[in-house]
Image: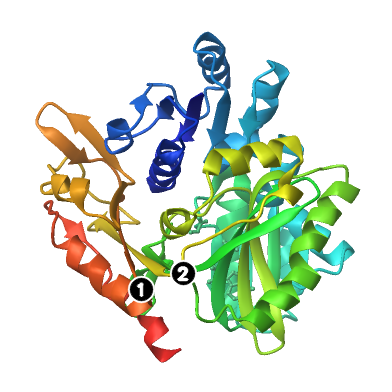
């Protein structure tokens, strides 16, 4: 069969890698893809938000399955556009992708269906938000309602900081129209865990757990980024935590969406925080995490195509997910200056070393193929991933493999997965 993947990051490279392993797949296309994805798929120069062009391409090439990796096209309704053309697509429809597209929606859903999350209020104007802050406890968390590249969350330690935050989100529109509404919520403390799941509208199957390192600098310092590295599984995701989440979070979320007439098919990503009072949902995403996908998918034994089709067809109850009994660590090699400003266009050396190294992966996040070779083309450039028998070994392997490649301006964190040593 022919598969089209929509997106251009490390997540889409990891998806393409898994799709390529399926004996059912003859040809992979990716719109728009990147330098690394181009080694296993044919990249087509169509942007992820060019819905009409994507649909026309899928029709013309007789694509059997389109996998939408990115949040923007999901929230914008690409799956609806493809389905209207009679094409098969993996991912939630627009009315279900709102689970990620609007934080105010997801908070109200959790409140209505008693799914554990931080206490909050939603606001659609700055005056009310500023008035609310007068009697609030600090620290407090401000969230722009819409998509903001993972940057729309501000943790404020004082009234002054929070006032500035409300003004920048709602008045200065720092995150654009994502800030037309906002959520103000209680600050929670605890370990964070990312749990990805497949959902077919009724049944939910949980993948192995992972943890992301969102801050730019070692020791969880610096600005929030899209993610500087991940490890899987999380030793903090114990059987007790799993049992709690199965009962109070996972199935209740799927049932809540169905009850609202927003049947969810695709991947739900649960951003959890393990507080002293038990697990709470920090956020939902309607897609694979990035870089979580880079440590979770390489450990999955199932044929990804089979699982995606079971989600579309509503037969996920007949699927049992299997993961290797090992661990994986992904270290992001970024351009110095990310997430603020950085240069790109530098030649990357050493990539071929990964071609024949079993258990090692070089997922491309921001790269481009040029006549001179593959060059850097983004803030996050590569996701260097390695497996090991346990997290310690996977971590040592991943850091060793970061030395195989080089490019000017290279930056990485040195403590990805280090928290696991304390577990
Ligand atoms: P989100 O995009 O909602 O996952 O938020 C990004 C990051 O902000 C999370 O990974 C947390 O580290 C932090 N965060 C979000 N909400 C809260 C909260 N209620 N309490 C503490 N930290 C939070
Ligand atoms: N790594 C977090 C995300 O994909 O949103």
- Residue 200 falls in image quadrant: top right
Crowdedness near tag 1: few (<14), some (14–19) or many (≥20) residues, C-alpha within 10 Å: few
Counting from the top left corner in percent of width and height, residue 307 is at 61, 44
Q: Residue at x 75, y 81 (%)?
A: 135
- Name the residue rendered at 32%, 33% in the picture: 40
Q: Is mark 2 within 8 Å of ligand 2?
A: no
Say left or right for 166 vs 263: left
Label 2 SS: loop
Foreground of the two, 53 or 175:
53
On screen, 10 above or below 7? below
Does the rendering let one see residue 186?
no
Residue 180's spot in the image, x, y percent? 67, 48
Question: Which type of secondary structure does the marked residue at label 1 adopt?
Answer: loop
Count of residue discs:
2
Pointer 1: what residue?
389
Whichever of callouts 1 and 2 sits on the residue coming sooner in the sequence is 2
Q: Position of residue 61 (x, y in %)?
A: 49, 12
Residue that appears at 24% across and 50% down: 342
The residue tagged 2 is 325
Q: Residues within 10 Å of mark 2 (few under 14, many from 20)?
A: few
- Residue 363: give its label: none
Q: Is residue 4 above or below residue 206?
A: above
| Residue displayed at 37% across by 64% down | 229
The furthest residue to the top: 60
Query: For this rendering, which residue is in front, 140 or 332?
Result: 332
Q: Position of residue 165 (x, y in %)?
A: 56, 65
Of 423 and 348, nearer the camera is: 423
Q: In the image, is residue 186 above or below residue 285?
A: below
Q: Which quadrant holds residue 272?
A: bottom right
């Amino acid at each position: 069969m022919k598969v089209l993947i929509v997106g251009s990051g490390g997540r889409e490279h990891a998806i393409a890698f898994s799709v390529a392993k399926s004996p059912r797949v003859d040809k992979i296309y990716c719109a728009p893809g990147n330098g690394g994805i181009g080694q296993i798929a044919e990249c087509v120069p169509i942007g992820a938000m060019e819905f009409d062009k994507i649909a026309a391409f899928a029709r013309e090439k007789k694509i059997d399955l389109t996998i939408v990796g990115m949040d923007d096209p999901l929230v914008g309704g690409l799956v609806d556009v493809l389905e209207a053309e009679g094409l098969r697509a993996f991912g939630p429809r627009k009315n279900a992708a709102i689970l990620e597209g609007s934080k105010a929606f997801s908070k109200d859903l959790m409140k209505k269906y008693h799914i554990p999350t931080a206490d909050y209020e939603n606001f659609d104007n700055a005056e009310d938000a500023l008035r609310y802050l007068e009697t609030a406890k600090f620290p407090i968390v401000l969230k722009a309602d819409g998509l903001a590249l993972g940057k729309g969350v501000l943790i404020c330690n004082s009234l002054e900081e929070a006032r500035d935050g409300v003004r920048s989100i709602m008045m200065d529109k720092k995150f654009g129209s994502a800030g037309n509404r906002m959520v103000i919520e209680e600050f929670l403390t605890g370990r964070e865990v990312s749990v990805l799941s497949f959902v077919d509208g009724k049944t939910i199957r949980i993948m192995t757990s992972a943890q992301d390192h969102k801050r730019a600098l070692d020791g969880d310092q610096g600005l929030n980024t899209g993610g500087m590295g991940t490890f899987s599984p999380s030793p903090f995701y114990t059987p007790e935590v799993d049992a709690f989440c199965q009962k109070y979070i996972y199935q209740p979320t799927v049932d809540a969406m169905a009850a609202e007439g927003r049947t969810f098919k695709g991947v739900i990503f649960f951003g959890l925080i393990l507080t002293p009072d038990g697990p709470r949902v920090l956020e939902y995403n309607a897609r694979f995490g990035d870089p979580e996908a880079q440590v979770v998918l390489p450990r999955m034994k199932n044929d990804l195509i089979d699982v995606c089709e079971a989600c579309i067809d509503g037969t996920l109850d007949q699927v049992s997910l299997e993961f290797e009994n090992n661990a994986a660590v992904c270290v992001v090699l970024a351009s110095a200056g990310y997430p603020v400003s950085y240069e790109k266009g530098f030649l990357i050396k050493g990539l071929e070393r990964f071609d024949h190294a079993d258990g090692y992966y070089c997922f491309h996040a921001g790269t481009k193929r040029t006549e001179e070779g593959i060059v850097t083309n983004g803030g996050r450039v590569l996701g260097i991933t390695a497996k090991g028998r346990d997290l310690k070994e996977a971590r040592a392997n991943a850091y060793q493999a970061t030395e195989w490649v080089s490019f000017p301006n290279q930056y990485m964190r040195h403590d990805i997965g280090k928290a696991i040593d304390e577990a």
